[in-house]
Image: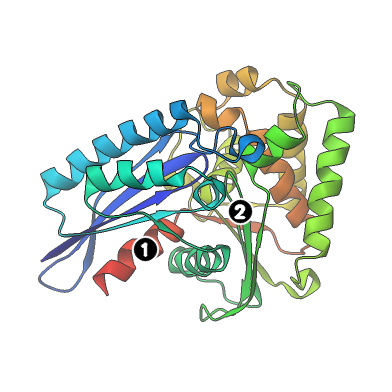
């Protein structure tokens, strides 16, 4: 049997997935966990990782490393995305990660992130008709991938917006003012207009990652997060718009108190919801939420 671990370190969260291939060739999930560390704190404004953000991230990686050691992981792939692409002092991050898990983080391009997100999404949701659009709204960037039902990517783009970046750049008040919301929407719409995605042609729409899953949990009124209820749930354009409007008009501490979102997710949820709802306004089908995403694609790739 082979045991592998994939770590996906984004702008807001860091996640671990441990898989093994058993004697019959089946893929078995041994551990899956997430911590919200806000690695991208202030990166958009300063161009550098904040010491507190590095400390939070290294603490999470220490806990992940203990899990990997306990499970006897043989191969590890550690991938970092938007925030690590932008930070000037990323060598501090590299050194800290290598000393803890024995491998250097791979700072993947937006195109590679998009390809992996698409493959992971279609591993969890099997759309019957295409073209398919996958939206992966992270903390620092949003990947849009258009392709076929056979996971063949036709066009992808990585937009330099995400829940943390948009919140820090435009949505300064709590809750944001109408002028701030209008400016954020105009910025998002401009990027979507230039994305090259043929939104009118889309016949299946899949949302992955924290923003999409959080919107599903909020819409379902889940008191605690339940992965099995979120996976493959569907959200209409109207439901996404309604959830975004509520999040944009509600103080984030109230969002935290009234939903199952933890603080670091609740604080930026209004920005992520604005992005996803803006995409949904351009496509006809409802959004199907997939719990399978880039992390699954990374781990399965190690077993291949």
Nearer the N terminus, badge 1 or badge 2? 2
* Rendered image: mark on residue 24: none
Residue appearing at x 64%, y 40% in the figure: 44
State the colouring used for the structure image.
rainbow
**Rendered position, 260 above or below 145:** above
- Marks 1 and 2, how far apart at CA: 25 Å
Asked whether, in this view, residue 144 is left or right of residue 19, the answer is right
Residue 261 seen anywhere in this rendered image of the structure: no
Q: Which residue is mark 1?
A: 298
Give 146 or 76, whichever is nearer the viewer.
Answer: 76
Residue 100 seen anywhere in this rendered image of the structure: yes
Q: Which type of secondary structure does the marked residue at label 1 adopt?
A: helix
**Label 1 crowding class (10 Å Cα cut-off): few <14, some 14-19, many 20+?**
many
Query: Where does residue 86 sit, x and y in percent of width and height?
Result: 57, 49
Query: Where does residue 49 sit, x and y in percent of width and height?
Result: 50, 36
**Rendered position, 158 above or below 244:** below
Give 106 or 227, whichever is nearer the viewer.
Answer: 106
Residue appearing at x 52%, y 50% in the figure: 209
Give 29 or 222, whichever is nearer the viewer.
Answer: 29
Residue appearing at x 68%, y 33% in the figure: 168
Q: Which type of secondary structure does the marked residue at label 2 adopt?
A: strand
Quadrant of residue 70 within the rendered picture? top left
Q: Which residue is mark 2?
A: 234
Query: Where does residue 162 sit, x and y in percent of width and height?
Result: 64, 46
**Rendered position, 171 above or below 212:** above
Quarter of the image for the N terminus: give it: bottom left
Question: Depth-wise, is mark 1 or mark 2 nearer the camera?
Answer: 1
Query: Where does residue 120 sit, x and y in percent of width and height?
Result: 45, 65
Asked whether, in this view, residue 130 is left or right of residue 182, the answer is left
């Amino acid at each position: 049997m082979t045991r592998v671990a994939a770590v996906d370190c984004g702008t807001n969260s860091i996640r671990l997935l441990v898989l093994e291939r058993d004697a019959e060739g089946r893929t078995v999930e041994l551990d899956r966990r997430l911590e919200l560390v806000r690695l991208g704190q202030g990166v958009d404004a300063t161009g550098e990782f904040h010491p507190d953000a590095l400390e939070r991230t290294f603490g999470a990686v220490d806990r992940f490393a203990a899990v990997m050691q306990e499970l006897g992981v043989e191969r590890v792939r550690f991938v970092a995305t938007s925030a690590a692409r932008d930070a000037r002092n990323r060598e501090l991050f590299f050194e800290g990660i290598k000393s803890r898990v024995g491998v250097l983080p791979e700072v993947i391009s937006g195109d590679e992130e998009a390809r992996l997100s698409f493959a992971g999404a279609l591993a969890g949701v099997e759309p019957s008709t295409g073209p398919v659009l996958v939206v992966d709204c992270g903390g620092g960037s949003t990947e849009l991938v258009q392709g076929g039902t056979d996971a063949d990517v036709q066009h992808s783009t990585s937009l330099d917006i995400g829940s943390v970046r948009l919140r820090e750049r435009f949505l300064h008040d709590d809750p944001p003012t109408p002028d701030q919301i209008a400016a954020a929407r105009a910025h998002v719409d401009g990027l979507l207009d230039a994305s090259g995605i043929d939104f009118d042609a889309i016949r299946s729409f899949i949302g992955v990652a924290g923003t999409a899953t959080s919107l599903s949990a909020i819409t379902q009124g889940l008191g605690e997060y339940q992965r099995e209820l979120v996976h493959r749930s569907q959200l209409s354009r109207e439901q996404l718009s309604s959830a975004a409007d509520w999040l944009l008009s509600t103080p984030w501490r109230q969002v935290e108190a009234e939903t199952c979102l933890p603080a670091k997710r609740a604080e930026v949820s209004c920005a992520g919801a604005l992005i996803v709802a803006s995409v949904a306004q351009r496509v006809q089908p409802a959004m199907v939420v997939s719990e399978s995403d880039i992390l699954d694609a990374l781990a399965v790739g190690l077993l291949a």
